[in-house]
Amino acid sequence: MSTFSAAAGQPQASTILVVEDEPTLATAIAQRLASEGWNARVCGDGASAVQTAAQIHPDLVIMDIMLPVMDGIEATKRITAARPVPVLMLTARDDESDKLTGLAAGADDYMTKPFSMRELVARCKALLRRVERAKQLAGNPQNDQTLRFGGIVIDPAQRIVTLDGKDVHMTPTEFDLLLTLARRPRSVLSREQLLQDVWGWTDGSGTRTVDSHVKSLRHKLGSDTIRTVHGVGYAFEPPED
């Protein structure tokens, strides 16, 4: 495992765990992250990533899917089950099934190889901003009101979702997306607005991130829970009591 540290004097630099078995790419990612003011730790397989995450408690994980010893899907499941942490998954195929599998495992976002380092940095910044925003919202009593829609209950304070009394596992991004839609039931929110409010992106042109997360939410809560308005965006459709 290699360590790449931010320059001296960086206040409370975030730590990012990079899990990638291609040494050249892993080093390039870690060096770029360090140049941005973050600390980066590199692991080359999924099993060591799980162990390292338990030791260093990273603020963000960048996880490749195809890894030796333990693949990125299983590693992500174990890391996020032990401790909530945003995960940016890397996939070598622009395959919708790969992306949905990664999101279902606990990933918050994904990028398809090859990618630009500039975009990678932007995604990392957005994920870290969302973590800080979630902490601020959790500390605001006005945001603690539990939302109840038939069998769906959303508890913002504890970040828990239940369906017919049973807990539904949500990644941090899935929860934020659901809460954003549910706070304005039946109102259509554009993809651009969702990308800005949930992901913190000012320009998400060309990305299918919102669509993939909506599919994951429908799989967990029911296909009728979120309505598609073609060419515009999505709306939360509360189930009847």
Image: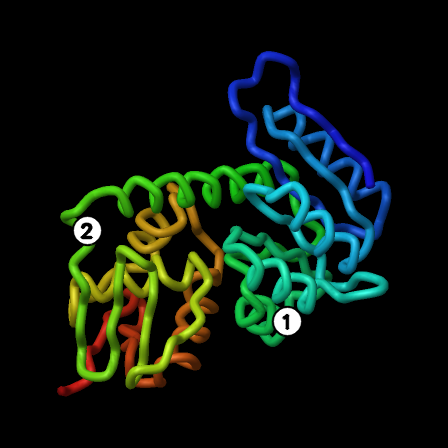
Amino acid carrying label 1: it is: Asp
Mark in front: 2 vs 1: 2
Which residue is at a point 63% across and 40% down the rendered structure image? Answer: 16
On screen, residue 197 versus residue 38, left or right, reads: left
Quickly name the residue at label 1.
98
Which residue is at a point 13% across and 87% down the rendered structure image? Answer: 241
Which residue is at a point 40% across and 75% down the rendered structure image? Answer: 168
How many numbered badges does the structure rendering display? 2
Determine which quarter of the picture holds residue 183.
bottom left
Is the residue 17 above or below the residue 7 in the image? below
Give me the disc on residue 177.
none
Q: Position of residue 138 (x, y in %)?
A: 28, 47
Choose the circle earlier in sequence order: 2 or 1.
1
Is the residue 178 above or below the residue 90 in the image? below
In the image, 58 versus 178, the foreground residue is: 58
In the image, 28 versus 161, the foreground residue is: 161
Quickly name the residue at label 2.
143
Q: Position of residue 216 (x, y in %)?
A: 45, 74
Determine which quarter of the picture holds residue 148.
bottom left
Disc 2 secondary structure class: helix
